[in-house]
Amino acid sequence: MPQRSRRSHRLHAALAEFYAPGLAGDTFVNRAFTLTSRLVPSALNSHGIIDPKSGVLTANFDSTPPGLADAFAAFGRHMAKYAPFRFDPAVNGGEPFSARDFYSGPAFRDLDIYQEVYRPMRLVDHCFVHVPAGGGATVFVGLLRDGRPFDRGEKELLALIQPHLSHGRRMAFAITAAENAPLSPELFAGVGFTPRESDVLYWLTQGKSNDAIAKILRLRADSVSRHLQNIYDKFGVEQRVAATIHAIDLARKVHAEAIARQGGDVLLTVATRRGRPPPSA
């Protein structure tokens, strides 16, 4: 298998695992770690969020090697002095970059941040991937390496998954926020989708592939694709992740409006396709 085909196969397999059912606010970070580590080997993987107002940086790591706490504290002391480390989304035009894009090996080793952070951890490079998040926070996924520096091909691969990290994060937190908003085909039918579009949209929110949806609904795959395109057009989006996020946000909105009308928890009543609406309470 040619190298390009192998890389494409690995990318699609890793993304399928990333978006698989179970993606939520409390699983996103580990999903991000798994996605990046499957594609680009590293010694340590991090997920950091900095509050631009307070300047507070918080981070998760996929392991806790000796000395990590001291190294992280030193990173916080020195990061603002150097462009590659200050969590600035504008660096490198927003695309993934590494410390060694800015410094040669000897120049990097002369920095105090290297002496106090990377040298004690025996790390030679740090690759940063900005994750556009909204809401004011600045989010980065970082890969740290103890062998050779990150190469151009690896950073190109990280650039391919960068939008997925952003979409996946939004989707994960939308799913968690919508846990109390019931998702159903009837909900989507009530806001302007056709019955078949509503069925397809519901299963889309459950993480099902086109083939799986076709089997569940006993439709042809091209029919599912046609319904999905209609859904995309109605939402004004171009792909399934964005449609899923819009659908979940829509469910939250409908649920919140129903609560506001009734002044409390919603008791939902729905009509079956063959029956009549139930009488009002």
Image (tube, helix red, strand yellow):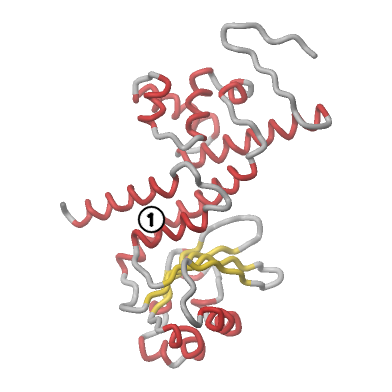
* Above or below: residue 37 compared with residue 28: below
| Image location (x, y in percent) of residue 14 | 36, 51
Residue 3, by quadrant, is bottom left
Q: State whether residue 248 appears in this view.
A: yes
Crowd rating for badge 1 (residues with CA inside 10 Å; few <14, some 14–19, many 20+):
some
Query: What residue do we see at 26% from left, 55% from top?
Result: 7
Amino acid type indicated by mark 1: Leu
Residue 86, by quadrant, is bottom right
Q: Is residue 280 found left or right of 151 in the rendered image?
A: right
Q: Which residue lies furthest to the left in this view?
A: 1
Q: Residue furthest top?
A: 275
Q: State whether residue 79 appears in this view.
A: no
Q: Which residue lies furthest to the bottom in this view?
A: 110
* Above or below: residue 169 compared with residue 180: below
Q: Give the residue number, with chain letter if any, for mark 1.
A: 160
| Image location (x, y in percent) of residue 278 | 70, 10
| Image location (x, y in percent) of residue 241 | 48, 41
Query: What residue do we see at 63% from left, 39% from top?
Result: 179
Pick the front one: 264 or 163: 264
Which quarter of the figure is the C terminus placed in? top right
* Above or below: residue 181 compared with residue 96: above
Query: What residue do we see at 36% from left, 65% from top?
Result: 155
Identify the element where label 1 is drawn.
helix
| Image location (x, y in percent) of residue 34 | 41, 58
